[in-house]
Amino acid sequence: MSESTGGRVSYVLGSTFHPSRLVEVARAVEAGGFSGVWSTEDYFATGGFAGAATVLAATERIQVGTGLVSVYARHPALLAMEAGTLAAVHPGRFALGIGAGGLGWLDQQGVEHRRPLGAVRGTVEALRALWAGQTLSEELGSFTFDGVHLEFAPETPPEVHLGATGPKMTALAGEISDGLLLSVFSSPSFVRVEKEIMAAHGGAATPVTTLAFLSLAPTREEARARIRPLLGGYLADSESAAMTDALGITAELRALVARGGPEALVSEMPDKWVDQLCVCGDVDACVAQIQALHDAGSDEVALAPISADTLLGDIQELGSALHAG
């Protein structure tokens, strides 16, 4: 628990540094007083389950989850088996984060990704049935099961957290999930919108984890300069306007891109956009932005660091600041 912000603060690990460093970084996160790690599966960097297993084995107390793995990349029976194994070996410490995933990455592999709402709903139903010891011989969410039964169902099944951006998937998270995972570049305004959608679908008490890119530097100017290329490229390519609609900047953003492409967006977007969409600045500014995400309704803020060179020092500095006082 972070004393300064009154909510959980975790790290997102797996995409911005070589996996050979995962053990030392995970141990630094735990030593820094952070509450957990979400193991990413951004293709083609570090495997989500392999990363989560590594972090669980290297640490003693922190919570670890996949954040997130695509329901299309593995059959639900395989998801149930892999997640069930980690839950059995590390009871109470593992959570399964799933979602549709990056559709462009799936296209690169020729993996079909039709009807995401049905696929996610069917996956969650199958996971819980298999973990409960049931044998499945049916079709769920376009996935086929023929006498599928887990040999070793976990005594304590893991929580299932859903990644969502659009309102329909967020509503589904409120209906069936144990938690909502919000993508990086989620502003406090977007967190409030998502909370309202979940509440309207029975998920008022469903916890929210907000992923956020972290750019920590000695000055705000330097931190913004580091994150601008990443932020600009993402916003220029994003198929969803939900996160920018929450800030009322979608029209202006698209006009910038139309005029000068992603380069114009990187150089000309206001500093205010950067500060709202990332945890960015010196350590005091970063703590304040984490606080703003908590105040908006995030039960947990999970930081995705962009600077591999200063990673261990940044973890120590931010951990000290969050637990000061």
Image: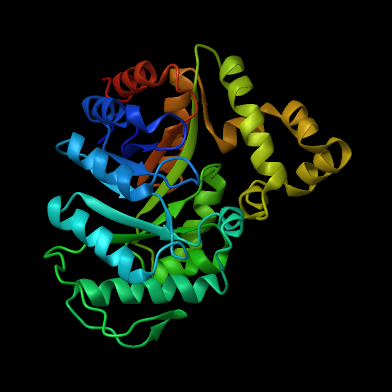
In front here: 77 or 227?
A: 77
On-image quarter of the C terminus: top left
Q: Quadrant of residue 288?
A: top left
User: Is 151 positioned to the left or the right of 147 in the image?
Assistant: left
Q: Which residue is the extreme one toward the bottom?
A: 138
Residue 25 in view? yes
* Residue located 43% across and 47% down the image: 41
Against 26, is 242 above or below? below
Residue 176 in view? no
Against 25, is 176 above or below? below
On-image quarter of the N terminus: top left
* Residue located 18% across and 39% down the image: 57
Q: Which residue is the extreme one toward the front?
A: 109
In front here: 4 or 137?
A: 137
Against 320, is 152 above or below? below
Residue 116 coordinates in the image, percent (x, y): 53, 70
Q: How is the image coloured?
A: rainbow
Q: Which residue is the extreme one toward the top?
A: 218
Residue 150 coordinates in the image, percent (x, y): 20, 72
Total label count?
0
Residue 311 coordinates in the image, percent (x, y): 40, 21
* Residue located 21% across and 39% down the image: 62
Q: Which residue is the extreme one toward the left?
A: 155
In front here: 20 or 121?
A: 20
User: Is 33 positioned to the left or the right of 248 in the image?
Assistant: left
Residue 13 coordinates in the image, percent (x, y): 38, 36
User: Is 125 positioned to the left or the right of 266 in the image?
Assistant: left
In front here: 59 or 109?
A: 109
